[in-house]
Amino acid sequence: MLNFARRYLIPGAILQSVMIGGGYGTGREVVEYFSNYGTMGGFYSVLIAAVCIAIVFAVSLEISCVFNVFDYRNFFKVFLGRFWFLYEILAILLFLLIIAVIASAAGQVLQAELEIPSFMGTVVMLFSVVVLTFYGRDLVVLVLAYWSVFLYAVFIVYFIAVFSIFQDSFTGQASTTEPGWFTSGLQYAFYNMAGIPLILYAARAIETRQQALIAGIVGGVIAMIPALLLHVSFISQLPSILGAGLPVYEMFIRLDQDWLKIGYLIVLFGTFIETGAGTIQGFVERFDGWWSDRTGDLLSPKIHATIAGAIVALAGILSQVGIIDLIAKGYGTLAWGFMILYIIPLLTVGIWRLYVVDRDSPDG
């Protein structure tokens, strides 16, 4: 059972954990890329994103296992060669943006709930990320996997509450499809798939192509179910919810269920921390690989924490821009860069490299 979870469930759970802080934890990405395109347009966009993520995730897991590459530097050398570093430039920008989004959201929520300066929430969240990174990959994987289960439980309860309390609001919503849903679904998938190379450390238990394919499909579903549920819940509050900086938090306020809001706030901060830690672990794996190539040893936990501290400090400064502008402008721009540097080369050169390996194998 443990091997089953490690092969088929944990990779998707960790991918979802990396995606969930800025997008699902706040709901702002769901509004920006799905709900903005109408009730049915949002559904279509979610489907497009899920299919794209499943395909790219499966191929990435297969390449990672076949070529025994579990950090993004060596992974991109398989199909980008000497130009692997171009991904790193975009990845650093995206990572800083993700951490800035969740830091901004953490500050806003603490200010609204506890009336303390927003920067204090940002500091607490970022410090927790550094501490978790200090204790290494095994703890990060464990926390990310189990926290996803807790998160799902809270969001299922939230979903049931929305249908129970706002059921009349759903019947009054027209079935609408706004133009642009297809492109929006692609954009959402492109920049979220950029996190896949950062979590390849979760693919170490996968041994066969079939396992990689199943894990990729399961991962695409796991990653997108929260987006689907949130979009459905937002339908009851269209169009007023579209302008909210933290749509999920706004929904909990409108539900007026204190016990549920407390559960959400616990989940929210947990997802912020796991998103930051999960992504930082990818960068730590990259630095470990570089250092191991030079010296044969891995970096110490203190250096891991120092790397994490420097990155989150930069993200904390960026978080002062504001969550709506960060998501609306930053993510959309980076999405096309990842399409060019990651998705197209992966699905062309990467698949060709897999074909060559199959052809040259004794059973090929």
Image (tube, rainbow, N blue to C red):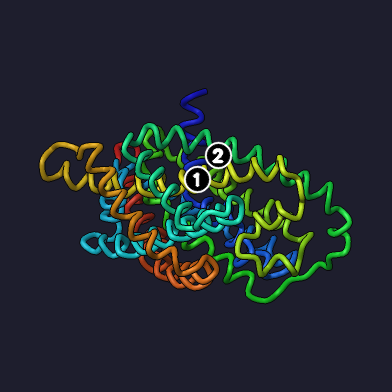
Closer to the camera in the image, 5 or 326: 326
Mark 2 lies on a secondary structure that is helix
Seen at 21% across and 37% down, the residue is 300
Residue 353 in the image, given as x and y percentages of width and height: 32, 53
Seen at 63% across and 54% down, the residue is 227
Image position of 105 (left or right of 47): left
Residue 352 in the image, given as x and y percentages of width and height: 35, 56
Badge 1 vs badge 2, beta-carbon distance below 8 Å: yes
Q: Report crowding for label 1: few under 14, some 14 to 19, many 20 or more residues within 10 A (C-alpha).
A: many
In the rendered image, the quadrant that contains the C terminus is top left
Closer to the camera in the image, 280 or 193: 280
Q: Which mark is residue 17?
A: 1
Q: Amino acid at mark 1?
A: Ser
Residue 36 in the image, given as x and y percentages of width and height: 67, 69
Closer to the camera in the image, 164 or 209: 164
Most extreme residue toward the bottom is 179
Which residue is labeled 2 in the image?
148
Quarter where residue 203 is shown: top left
Q: Earlier in the sequence, mark 1 or mark 2?
A: 1
Image position of 121 (left or right of 150): left
Most extreme residue toward the left is 295
Q: Amino acid at mark 2?
A: Ser
Look at the picture and state if 161 lies above or below 143. Answer: below
Seen at 33% across and 34% down, the residue is 135
Quarter where residue 50 is shown: bottom right
Can residue 11 be seen at all in this image of the molecule? yes
Residue 116 in the image, given as x and y percentages of width and height: 53, 54
